[in-house]
């Protein structure tokens, strides 16, 4: 009985593994998977075979988004040289720039901006690259986006700004930068009325709350 159980588990495991392989590396997803894992040889080979550089998966994502998300600068450059749409949106509205910014890939952010990425492009909920990088405490990326003209006070539902995202997660360096660059500290979140200071307090981010008070932020 135990042997039969082990065999059943093994078959199920093999079946799941096979399905994963089919989904991830079987056509039409092999191209995206190669970009995701930094497999330049496969990317080059498939482009040479005529695979569309902006082929989308079931989530509306293109290979450039995968490479940008994972920090594969060589793949990003290769896809851009092949004509990838730097401002493509996934079904959820995310762009290569938003993906790179959230993950702190500064060099890729620079490459995408140079290639014409819209610095204030938004996801379906209104999230910008500046918000995504601020939320993750990616201060160098935040600075680069601001230097590129990002709207520092842009809001997404429910009236959240980059400063509010940084404050609630306790990213002091990012908060300092945003305040120094003129971020509005008195935006109230829709529904509960929290400001950046209120969010910092609610999440027990003491140093951030102190900095916001010093900057004259409202409760």
Image: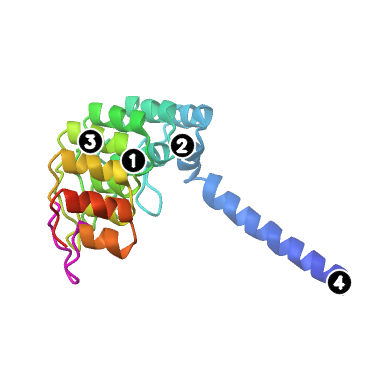
SS class of the residue under badge 3? helix
Residue drawn 33% across and 28% down?
80
From the image, tell me which residue sits under label 2: 35
* Mark before the other along the chain sequence, 3 or 1: 1
Magenta residues (range) = 185-196
SS class of the residue under badge 2? helix
SS class of the residue under badge 4? helix
Please report contact status of discs 4 and 3: CB closer than 8 Å, yes or no. no
Mark 1 residue crowding within 10 angstroms, few (<14) / some (14–19) / many (20+): many
Question: Based on the displayed image, in which of its 4 quarters is residue 71 positioned?
Answer: top left
Q: Nearer the viewer, residue 160 or 208?
A: 208
From the image, tell me which residue sits under label 1: 138
Alpha carbons under labels 2 and 1: distance apart: 23 Å
Alpha carbons under labels 3 and 1: distance apart: 11 Å
Q: Nearer the viewer, residue 13 or 117?
A: 117
Position in image of residue 129 (x %, y %): 26, 44
Side of 82 relative to 74 (left or right):
left
From the image, tell me which residue sits under label 4: 2
* Mark before the other along the chain sequence, 2 or 3: 2
């Amino acid at each position: 009985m135990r042997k039969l159980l082990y065999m059943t588990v093994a078959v199920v495991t093999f079946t799941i593994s096979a399905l994963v392989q089919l989904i991830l590396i079987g056509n039409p997803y092999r191209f995206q998977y190669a970009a995701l894992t930094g497999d330049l040889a496969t990317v080059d080979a498939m482009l040479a075979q005529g695979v569309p550089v902006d082929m989308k998966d079931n989530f509306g994502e293109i290979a450039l988004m995968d490479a940008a998300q994972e920090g594969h600068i060589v793949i990003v450059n290769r896809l851009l040289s092949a004509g990838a749409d730097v401002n493509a949106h996934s079904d959820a509205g995310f762009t290569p720039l938003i993906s790179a910014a959230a993950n702190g890939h500064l060099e890729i952010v620079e490459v995408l901006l140079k290639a014409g990425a819209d610095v204030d492009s938004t996801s379906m909920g209104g999230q910008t690259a500046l918000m995504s990088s601020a939320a993750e405490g990616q201060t160098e990326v935040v600075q680069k986006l601001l230097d590129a003209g990002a709207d520092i006070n842009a809001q997404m539902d429910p009236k959240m700004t980059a400063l509010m995202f940084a404050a609630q997660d306790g990213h002091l360096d990012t908060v300092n930068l945003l305040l120094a660059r003129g971020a509005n500290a008195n935006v109230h979140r829709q529904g509960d009325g929290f400001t950046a200071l209120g969010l910092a307090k609610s999440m027990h981010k003491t140093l951030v709350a102190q900095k916001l008070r010093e900057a004259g932020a409202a409760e």
